[in-house]
Image (tube, helix red, strand yellow):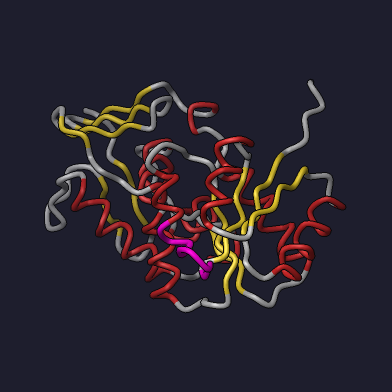
Amino acid sequence: MTGRKTSILAVDDDIRMLRMMHRILVLEGYRVVDANTGESFLDAFDEESPDLVLMDIMLPDTDGYTLCRRIREFSHTPVVMVTAKGNEREKIQGFDAGADDYVTKPFSSRELTARVRAVLRRTRPWDQDSAATFRCDDLAVDFARHRVTVAGREADLTATEYRVLCYLAANAGRVVTPDQVLERVWGEAYSGETHLLQVYIARLRKKIWDDTRNPRYVLTRPGIGYMMRQSS
């Protein structure tokens, strides 16, 4: 054990909010670096290589969605959006950009720290508890390289779509309930949001060229949940 503290990079143009998050997280034992613009965030991200990002959506020089898409081009660092916008459409937009969770303002210190702990736990490398590669016919999931291919063609998945697929692949041959997927991929706060999962299952099937009427990979068990088919 090196004793290295988990590092968090927080970006928000509201200085009082930034100071409050900084104080809460430092008291929890994290090392926290602050930024208040998109430009300063990118500089700090490059320099610090944080373990997690807390990102406000509205910034003076850009927005959180754009920043999240930018870092997803080269990093799988978990991102928690911190925002006053909390409806389903905006959440889906954030998840599509690569966010791992949302904290809606105003929030308590307990909620913030619980979300941070849950996301850090949930986004640990999948290859720690999975085989190096999952295969089912033409579908291949390389956990170590975060790469998904179908018949040799790479599938362009978002970070959230990838984690849904990984969870199903890690449980291939076993039916998992919607709440099991939601809690593992999004966290306990998303239990019951079956429509959100349905949106992502539909998008995932499309991107891995899986026929929704006669799926080869992601099977639906009506009234129960979903199952990734095992290779025959």
For the point 36% across and 58% down, which residue is it?
96
Q: Quadrant of residue 84?
A: bottom right
For the point 27% across and 51% down, which residue is it?
204
Q: Quadrant of the C terminus?
A: top left
For the point 37% across and 37% down, which residue is it?
169
Instruction: Say how many tags the image has.
Output: 0
Using the image, determine if residue 166 lies above or below residue 200.
above
Measuring from the top left, give residue 139's x and y in whole percent: 22, 33
Name the foreground residue: 2 vs 119.
Answer: 2
Measuring from the top left, give residue 64's x and y in whole percent: 48, 61
Magenta segment boundaries in residue numbering: 58-66
The answer to whether residue 65 is magenta is: yes
The answer to whether residue 181 is magenta is: no
Measuring from the top left, give residue 82's x and y in whole percent: 60, 66
Q: Quadrant of residue 231?
A: top left
Q: Quadrant of the N terminus?
A: top right
Predominant SS along the magenta part: loop
Q: Is 85 displayed left or right of 47 in the figure?
A: left
Using the image, determine if residue 15 lies above or below residue 129.
below
Residue extending farthest right: 27
Q: Is 48 displayed left or right of 214 in the figure?
A: right
Name the foreground residue: 67 vs 160.
Answer: 67
Measuring from the top left, give residue 115's x and y in whole percent: 66, 58
For the point 43% across and 25% down, which residue is it?
144
Using the image, determine if residue 111 lies above or below residue 142.
below
